[in-house]
Amino acid sequence: MSGPSTYTPQTGFARWLDTRLPIMRFVHDTATTFPTPRNLNVWYTFGGILMFCLAVQILSGIVLAMHYVPNADLAFTSVDNIMRDVNYGWMLRYMHANGASMFFLAVYIHMFRGLYYGSYKAPREVLWILGVIIYLLMMATAFFGYVLPWGQMSFWGATVITNLFTSLDQIIPGVGTGIAHWLWGGFAVGDPTLNRFFSLHYLLPFVIAGVVGLHIWALHVPGNNNPLGIDVKGPQDTVSFHPYYTVKDAFYLSLFVIVFAVLVFYAPDFVGNPDNYTPANPLVTPPHIVPEWYLLPFYAMLRAIPQKLLGVLVLFGAILTLAFIPWLDTSKVRSSRFRPLMKQAFWVLVLDAILLGYLGSKEPQAVWHLGVADVPLLWVARIATLYYFAFFWVIMPVLGWIEKTKPLPDSIAKSVLGKSSATAPAE
Amino acid sequence: MKHALRFVLTLAATVAVTGAVTGVAQAAEAVGEPIAPKHVEFSFEGPFGTFDRAALQRGFQVYKEVCSACHSLDRVAFHSLSDEGGPGFTEAQVKAIAASYRINAEPNDQGEIFDANGERLKRPGIPADHFPAPFANEKAARVANGGALPPDLSLITKALEGGPARVYSIITGFGEKPPAGFHVLDGKYYNPYFASWNISMPPPLVDGSVTYSDGTQATVDQEAHDVVTFLEWAAEPKMEERKRVGFGVMAFLLLLSGLLYLSYRKVWKDAH
Amino acid sequence: MTSTTAPDATRRDFLHIATGAVGAVGVAAAAWPFINQMNPSASVLALSSTEVDLTPVQEGQQIVVMWRSKPVFIRRRTAAEIAAAKAVKLSDLPDPLARNANLAADAPATDANREIKPEWLVLVGICTHLGCIPLDNQGDFGGYLCPCHGSEYDTAGRIRRGPAPENLYIPPYNFLNDTKIKIG
């Protein structure tokens, strides 16, 4: 908790502004003096990194939109015009495309951090759920955005995913197809679809920015969690956000930007799909339709289920499961540092997610040739999907009841200061 | 420091895993799946790679004299031939190259676009024009090529899995014996580097398909190498600028992260 | 102990200033492409000059070509039109400047300063009042009349009467040979 504001305006102008729109006070209280646990590690820098990613996507997106044409006959060429003729257009385009990948890379690390340290537990349940909402909005934004260049993968990825709605026909005949036609603005993905996806792709990032505001507000009410998972007991457990975490965030952000720059300048098509450099052709289906890497794990789950409607329910269920986590985990201990069984289950989950991503990139009928037998990857995907759901719906509740946790330290300050050789108090 | 290392290694590992996941490693034994492209080296590979100017000009000659009979290069404008990082023609040379092409003309003062013989009215090209296509539309292209559509080549080295090496392999990959039991379709050729292994294009290059103006011996390998270099430039005309700016950006970022690290350590020195 | 407060703001710390300065340079360098992308792109610049073949233009006739999205009048003047333009006194002109992109900004609006070869008049066909396109062979001065608000120009495209403040602009151009000009 931050307590009463300690901001005192220093100049006449500052005093004048403070009584009319206390924006300086707001910045002072939330970003300068905000008491932050003194033991936050590198994994806690990804929130700030994510804000940077959102800013990069919005800024690069706005300038790209000055040249992009959202019409089925002109879209591909307008992107090609950006790459060849617009001043630095190639850089802005590669920043936006690779920036999306970096955005998801950061959000997955951020989410796994939250899982590991129990940041979703009371009193931060709403913070976590707002995060799930942001993640959903990100996926929608990325999906709409990938359609815009109107390449083969844009068109066919849109076709496959929007066709999922037709599975609702099994519940009420006609409803699913009706929804699909409504989404498409026609009888298949086409120009009307492209136009509305552009409108939504431009809109949603600003909705994300708004929800991020709520997310940070919800964070600031209880304050940050920390790697020990124990509450802040007093001022000795915290430092002011500025300069301690502004400089730490800036440093790790610069490392993140180095990785981003390597992609943009030296491997700009590395995470992309070559099929998207072929203009969309409704009459030619590419041999392997795959979404971008950050959607592959869910794609694998969808294809693992043989029945169309069930597959769709599993897909949505996998994402919605995340919202229930604060109540699925019954443990009284937050941080996996003190939960030896949860720690192992967590890392298996990480490997499981990577495995699912790999499986999502393979053809549905692919097999692993292991010396003794051929293992259809479909069955591996089913087992991996099972573990995903089991982790949240079985392991999380059960471990909370049966796990013997390690003893927690008395306080953050004791834990931090006890590690360093200096015993003098910080000042 | 070890945290920073862990951070970068995590990001890099994730990127690498992602690349491995998305990179489709084709199973060699699946019939019809294109086999791995041939090993071939190009001057433009690597973080410091650049285009070999002479190869670009020779490659342009190969495109012009061999490929352009069937394949368009719609997205490339003549003026880009004199741009930095490209074949390096002068503006005067580009003007002459453009003027050597016939471009569909606007309606004349009588509002006609065909002449008395029913031929489409044409005008000489200007640098702002794009390379004209060999066929008026897709249907005409298919009729002239036995139902197959020769793809536009402006982005071909980016549009195929395996990139420039793939394009090189396809155009030099003819003449091998198909495996026993594999059915080569009528009118097509066996080429294991192409999807389905049946390609409609006949082998496009032979030794001496062109006579290079710089005297280089025109073997199939040389011609293929040069035209692929040209096509990679056509797909990525900004490649040299990208790598040059990238170098400056990396140098700057290394400096900035170094300074930020020192500031970070200094700020936190008294806190523990 | 109490949580550490921000370091004393008046203590000039060279390292942090250096870091901040390098960061600011980076932000400025990164901002430049975002601003520059709004400048005309290569495909627009490729059309920034136009070559025109003059052989089809008869004496007393005018053609209109587009240059940088603007109409350019190319008029082959008759001897009478040339003589009429030369006869005008500079003091009769509301706008005394040549408005010729090929000359200095303060060159006077003599007929000689309005073209390169007297026979060929090359003008940007946009009225200097509010941007309408003047009609040729109309008006009391043998030149152009703008239908929007009645500005009248003479046989050298100079404003003589009406609300237009300036003579029609002469674009940058040059003769590549006797029958071809390049505008821009």
Image (cartoon, rainbow, N blue to C red):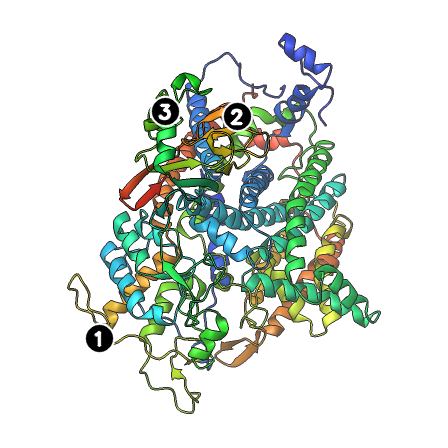
Nearest the viewer among C8 and B272 is C8
| Foreground: disc 3 or disc 2 | 3
User: To which residue does mark 3 refer?
Assistant: C87
| Image position of A183 (left or right of B207) | right
Residue farthest to the front, as pictured: C80
Q: Which mark is residue B207?
A: 1
Question: What's the CA distance linking mark 3 and mark 1?
Answer: 72 Å
Residue pointed to by mark 2:
C164
Residue B7 drawn at (x, y percent): 49, 44
Residue B185 lies, in percent from the top left, at 44, 87
| Number of numbered discs visible in the structure rendering | 3
Q: Nearer the viewer, residue A364 or B90?
A: B90
* Residue at the far left in the pictured view: B215
Q: Is residue B200 above or below residue B164?
A: below
Q: CA distance from mark 3 to mark 2?
A: 22 Å
Location of residue A374 with respect to A5 vertically, above or below: below
The reply to whether residue A329 is visible in this rendering is no
Q: Nearer the viewer, mark 1 or mark 2?
A: 2
Residue at horizontal 43%, vertical 40%? C73
Q: From the top left corner, tell me how far across and down residue A238 is, in percent.
A: 63, 27
Viewer-proximal residue among A65 and A291: A65
**Which quadrant would the N terminus of chain A be assigned to in this image?**
top right
Helix, strand, or loop for circle 2? loop
Q: In the image, are marks 1 and 2 on the same chain?
A: no
Q: Are marks 3 and 1 on the same chain?
A: no
Density class for disc 2 (Cα within 10 Å; few <14, some 14-19, many ≥20) is many
Q: Earlier in the sequence, mark 3 or mark 2?
A: 3
Query: Which of the 4 image quarters holds residue B223?
Result: bottom left
Is label 1 in a helix, a strand or a loop? Answer: loop
Within 10 angstroms of label 1, few (less than 14), some, or many (20 or more) residues?
few
